[in-house]
Image (cartoon, grey):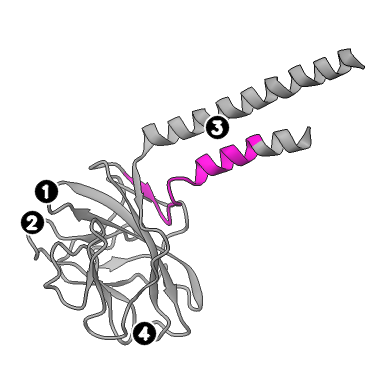
Amino acid sequence: MNSLQTLLSKFDKRWLGAGAAAAGAMAASQASEAAIVWSGVVNINVPSTTAGVYLNVVTGATGATSALAGWDINPWSSTSLNFFSSTTSGQTVATNMRTLAGSTTTYARLAPGASIGPADPFSTNVGTQTVNAGAPMLLNSSDNCVGFRFQNEATGQIHYGTARIQMGGTTGGQPRNIVDYAYESTPGVGIVACAPEPSSLALLALGAVGLIRRRK
């Protein structure tokens, strides 16, 4: 009996060590590959107006006019959901939305996990960007992922970001919210659509360690 207990103890320690190592490796890998800044669930309302809401994704500040310092994205419209880009507030490069190949004036709803980075197509116009007919927003859903690139006002460098949008029964009606958003803090490095909060993979890894222990 004592021999069996000793063997089980060794087995338990070996697998716990392996699980902890796996969790550490996953967390270290994530830290080295990306530095995602996630807003958390914020549910910022997008009014059904010609102003909509202005958002500075770096500071988290919102406003009802373009006077908001360093604003990056501006969803708006009373009849649809448009995004406006501008070179105001100290920016020299307009924020542009991730779109489908071949379009310069639209944005697209992206599949979760779709890439948003230097190799992807973005709108190039300064002004209104309407949704691409080939990838319209989903009504009565929070599964609307969009991507954008913006200039950090403080550094002048280009970053890539994503936002999750909740839509009601019509494109111009309510409820309509920015559920959450995220951006890659390393300039020029891409992100994926509807990126999860940075701690997700680490928590999953730790959960796996606990599951190994429980199963024993």
Please name the residue that numbered disc 2 is placed on: 92
Relative image position of residue 10 (x, y in whole percent):
75, 17
Amino acid type assigned to the residue bearing label 2 in the image: Thr
Residue 87: image x %, image y %?
10, 63
When asked about the image quadrant of residue 194, the answer is bottom left
Q: What's the CA distance linking mark 4 and mark 3?
A: 44 Å
Residue drawn at the location 50% of the way across and 28% of the way down: 25
Span colored in magenta: 190-209
Q: Residue at x 26, y 41 (%)?
A: 186
**Residue topped by disc 1:** 156
Image position of 69 (left or right of 143): left
> Mark 1, mark 2: which one is toward the viewer?
1
Percent position (x, y) of residue 78? Answer: 30, 87
The residue depicted at 77 percent of the width and 20 percent of the height is 9
> Does the CB distance between marks 1 and 2 fall below 8 Å?
yes
How many neighbours does mark 3 have within 10 angstroms: few (below 14), some (14-19), or many (20 or more)?
many
Residue 68 shows which numbered tag?
none
Circle 2: element type: loop
The residue labelled by disc 3 is: 23
Between the C-alphas of marks 3 and 2, the distance is: 42 Å
In primary-sequence order, the first of circles 1 and 3 is 3
Secondary structure at badge 3 equals helix
